[in-house]
Image (tube, rainbow, N blue to C red):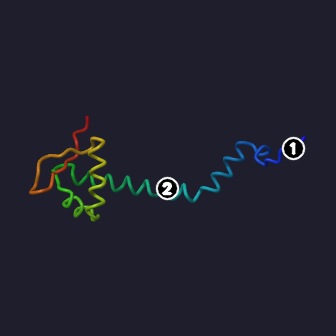
Amino acid sequence: MTTSTNPTKNVSRAEMLKQLRAQHAESVKRTQELLKEQKRIQKEICQVMRDTPKTVPEVAEAVGMPTREVLWYIASFKKYGLVVENGMCADYPLYQKAEEK
């Protein structure tokens, strides 16, 4: 007969979870910081478009971010119904925060 040499069998589930949390603490902290920053940016972009429609370059200038990053946020907002197109300004669509239901 062979005996199992698996060290995890002797470690309780709670101890394993504690070890995993300790091993991944830095990555969890980094992820939480990224999510916090993303929420801040989303809020700032939405505030700019709250009252009047704006183009992507106008929003980018108002929040001090590159146009390509603002376009990414606005495209995702549009996908999930948080902003709507509201006319055109030259070649640029105007975006405005969607009415809350």
Q: Residue at x 23, y 54 (%)?
A: 48
Residue sitting farthest toward the front? 1
Q: Secondary structure at mark 1?
A: loop
- 10 relative position to 48: left or right: right
The amino acid at mark 2 is Thr
Quarter of the figure with residue 100: top left
In the picture, the disc for residue 80 is none
How far across and how far down the image is residue 51, in percent?
Answer: 18, 49
How far across and how far down the image is residue 78, in percent?
Answer: 26, 45
How far apart in space, not on screen, are marks 2 and 1 (Cα)?
A: 41 Å
Specify the quadrant that holds the N terminus: top right
- Camera-side residue: 9 or 41? 9
The amino acid at mark 1 is Thr
Q: Residue at x 40, y 57 (%)?
A: 37
How far across and how far down the image is residue 17, in percent?
Answer: 66, 47
Q: Which residue is mark 2?
A: 31
- Whether tag 2 and tag 1 are in contact, CB under 8 A, the answer is no
Q: Secondary structure at mark 2?
A: helix
Q: Residue at x 21, y 51 (%)?
A: 49
How many C-alpha atoms fall within 10 Å of the one at disc 2: few (<14), some, or many (≥20)? few
In the picture, the disc for residue 3 is 1
How far across and how far down the image is residue 94, in percent?
Answer: 15, 51
Q: Earlier in the sequence, mark 2 or mark 1?
A: 1
How many C-alpha atoms fall within 10 Å of the one at disc 1: few (<14), some, or many (≥20)? few
Residue sitting farthest toward the top? 101
